[in-house]
Image (cartoon, rainbow, N blue to C red):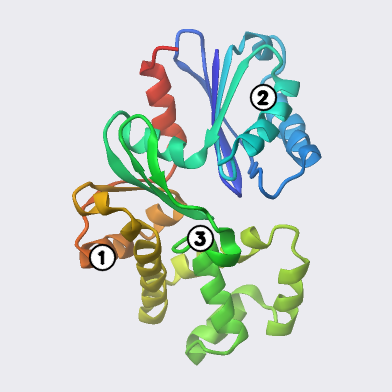
Amino acid sequence: MILIADSGATTTDWGLLNSNLTVNKYIKTAGLNANYLTDLEIYTILFNELKPHILSPIAEKITHVFFYGSGCSTEEKQQKIKNQIVKIIPNAAVSVYHDILGAAVSLCGNDMGIVCILGTGSNACFYDGKNIKKTLLSLGYFLGDEGSGTHIGKKMLYAYLKNKMPQDIYHLFYSTYKKQPEDMVAEMYAAPKVGAYLAQFAHFASENVHIPYIQNTVKECFNDFLREQVAQFDEAKHLPLGFVGSIAAVFHKELKSVVDEFGYTLGKIIQNPINGLVEFYQKAEI
């Protein structure tokens, strides 16, 4: 049996394949970002949320685990995740990769393309059909993550806290969350996962994207993403831009508009990379 995972900052999607490569089940757990979680926190999520779905004798039959995760850009971070997975699935060969490679495999398979992640966080790379050939240093929600849920949510929250929204939208935001600005500032700095806290306000944008002010704010965030990340790859001029992630899927109209303005070619937009990854490993020779 084969277990495949696509993990972001918020959630991890798992696909379990039977020995004949048919789908046994899909599982959802909390996100396992190696940059932000301790070893104990990673293990606790795996023990409480994954293990109940793969109890004996299933766990003993899993021969390979392919884990693609946010924050897994270095060998140290990859080993950090691997060390905890083997405690839950001791008989499997565990391979851990960066989530950008998972997005590339899911979107492109064995074809070349510019691969973009727009979920809670964001990233981009040039994929040659087998390996990530060019990528950028991810700066996280403090200094980067342009176009992501965190970025859009931060824009929404900032405009509310600074009273820079049109008044009708300001009142709509307050009626949605029913919290005064000073309370939200305290709540934000007390949040255990600030990125996830900020990203929740992207939902407000998605619910009200028909309002020109909010639509323009979302487009500005995508403009930042293409300018700061995609434009760094000369290959983007002649290869399609594929997107994975909830933000890309939810705001696909706004995203297409900005991609067209830049003169790029829009490729696939898929919300969940796990489906493409499962299809890939059903055909791969392991």
Residue type (three-letter) at the residue carrying disc 2: His
Q: Earlier in the sequence, mark 2 or mark 1?
A: 2
Which disc, if any, is residue 257? 1
Residue at point 53%, 75% (across, down): 156
On the rendered image, what quadrant is the N terminus found in? top right
Label 2, label 1: how far apart the Cα atoms are: 41 Å
Q: How many marks?
A: 3
Residue with the mark numbered 3: 145
Q: Position of residue 184 (x, y in %)?
A: 70, 76
Mark 1 in CB contact with mark 3 (< 8 angstroms): no
Let me know if residue 209 appears in the view: yes
State the SS at label 1.
Answer: helix
Compared with residue 23, is residue 148 higher up or lower down, i.e. above or below?
A: below
SS class of the residue under badge 3? Answer: loop
Q: Position of residue 30 (x, y in %)?
A: 66, 42
Residue 176: quadrant of the picture? bottom right
Q: CA distance from mark 2 to mark 3?
A: 33 Å
Vertical comparison of 31 with 182: above or below: above
| Residue displayed at 66% across by 48% down | 35
State which tag comes first along the sequence, 2 or 3: 2
Foreground residue, 129 or 155?
A: 129
Q: Which mark is residue 14?
A: none
Mark toward the viewer: 2 or 3:
3
**Mark 2 element type:** helix
Q: Amino acid at mark 3?
A: Asp
> Is 246 displayed left or right of 237 in the figure?
right
